[in-house]
Amino acid sequence: MTMAALSRSPSEIARETLKQLALRRLSPTPDHYLALYDEIAGVPSTPAFPSTPLRAILRVLPAQTPAQKRLLTALDKAVEEQSWAQMQSTLVGYANLGLAPVVTADQELAQAAPTRLPERLAENLARLVDNTLPALGEDDARLHEMAQQLCELLRTHDPLPADVERLLADFSHRVSFTAQDQAAIRSTLLALLRLVFENIAALCIDDAWLYGQAQSLLEASQPPLQLRRLDGVAQRLKDVIHKQTEAREHTVRAQAQMRELLASFIERLARMDESSSSYHQQLEQCAERISQAQRLEDIAPLLEEVIGATRAMALSTRVALGELQDLRSHADARHAEIDQLRQELDRASNLARHDPLTGSLNRKGFDEALEREVARALRQDRPLCVALLDLDDFKAINDRLGHAVGDQALVHLAQVARDALRPHDQLARYGGEEFVILLPDTELDEAAQIMRRLQRALTTRFFLQQGERVLITFSAGVAQVRGDADVSDAVRRADQGMYLAKRSGKNRVVAA
Ligand SMILES: Nc1nc2c(ncn2[C@@H]2O[C@H](COP(=O)(O)OP(=O)(O)OP(=O)(O)O)[C@@H](O)[C@H]2O)c(=O)[nH]1
């Protein structure tokens, strides 16, 4: 806006506009008035939609065939809605009518189809993408990138349908993978939840109420999960936790009672020992005095003394015996409870998927992870590799530094491996000093490089033992899993590679 325009009021500008219309000899139409008003006001003029002249053109266009009539109606609508995009695409369709030698109804429709994407459709598509994203999680960065690109394109003015189609196809391809992953994650989480419930049920077998609750939780967590049922599960779980806290307090109280009982028994034992030694002393003194006694009357009180001491001794022994029996029955009951708990824990630990020493997956956990990764690799058409590694000369470490240090060396290796590998690689302890690593999204040569990187990491992160740096090395074999039927053979090939690595001097990686 110019300074001159700034100082003028709207009525002044209107007066000036009328003056200029007359001076420039322009016909007094609303369009002319608007253009001149904007010019004088210094506002960039927005060209008005020329509805009147366009309608005049439409009136003279031929409307003989059904196709022409339909397209003219569409043109009329475009003028009505003041849509240049609709106008353009319908006009192109109209122009093409004359070019086609024989036009079928379908072709007419196709020709009439807009070559530009209707603005509203584009916006709705962009909204659909926006609304779909939260359901697909945050993990797939590429998916979010693709969604952003697509939405940006859809929200630019007049995007080319071919571009939209290409991005949309890529995006929907990616969505199909991510949706499958999400479904897999959901069912795994559900399985995990059920596992927790199974564990609760297994651990509270001797409490009928808790056991019943845990069974109901198991039933309630059957798929398909609905939000309402999940609420019920959460409520019930709260009750179980409350009851378990109570049960724990009960156990703590029982333990305290047991401790008290033991303490009083020990005290009693000490007293018994004291009283028995004073009893022996008394007896000895009495025997001495009896041997020196000259008369029977002197012996009688001595005997009475002996009988009194013996009675007191017998009484205290009987009390102690009673306490001992009490203690024994308490101890038996606790033993039975502990035995039962131990059995339940054994059962529960059979369900475990992790090696307790290194925290990596155990064989069972590995088998399940392998099954999942193979399915994912097939679904996404991505490579999957498996690596088998065995520590070199581990027996010598055990022999020289002891088994406990050997154990710590295994823990160290697992830690270094976890740090060196990518988050989605999975480490499992396969046997004593043998580990297996699953490498998703990895080609064979890349897998061999990753294992060599791990070897280098082990040479920089020493295993320190009482100030001594113990170098840990391993030999490894890697193989690519080529399809569903190849899983066990791939593990066998990796094993063979590891064997070759040992044979050819250890501390190396062989791809098989
Ligand atoms: N400390 C410890 N040692 C284990 C464990 N599992 C297996 N071992 C020991 O690992 C050693 C493996 O010895 P070998 O199979 O002869 O292999 P190595 O000495 O590593 O020799 P190469 O494999 O030929 O390099 C044995 O001494 C096992 O007792 C474990 O959990 N802890």
Image: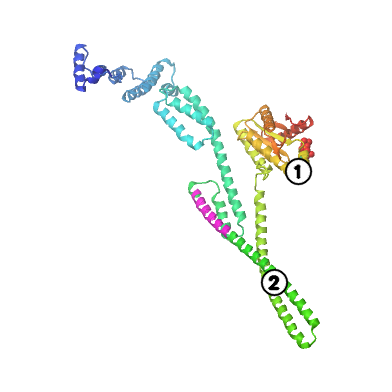
Q: Nearer the viewer, residue 118 or 398?
A: 398
Secondary structure beneath dot 1 equals loop
From the viewer's perspective, tell me whether residue 328 is left or right of residue 16: right
Toward the viewer: 72 or 451?
451
Work out whether residue 351 or residue 287 is closer to the camera in this orientation and state it.
Answer: 287
Q: Amino acid at mark 1?
A: Gly
Q: For residue 80, what is the image quadrant? A: top left
Location of ligand 1 given as a quarter of the image: top right
Magenta segment includes 203? no
x and y percentages locating residue 39 in the rendered image: 26, 16
Report the residue at 55% width, 42% height from top: 186
Q: Which residues are magenta?
A: 230-249
Q: Is residue 255 above or below residue 172?
A: below
Q: Is residue 419 above or below residue 157?
A: below
Q: Whole-Å distance between the Cαs marked 2 and 1?
A: 48 Å
| Residue 110 x, y percent position in the rendering | 44, 23
Residue 402 numbered tag: 1
Give, as a three-letter code, the residue at label 2: Leu
Find out whether residue 233 is within the magenta segment: yes
Residue 37 in view of the camera: no
**Closer to the camera in the image, 109 or 12:** 12
Residue at 75% over, 74% down: 281
Establish if 332 lies above or below 68: below
Q: Residue at x 50, y 48 (%)?
A: 230
Q: Position of residue 195 (x, y in %)?
A: 60, 48
The quadrant of the image that shows the C terminus is top right
Instruction: Identify the disc placed on residue 321.
Output: 2
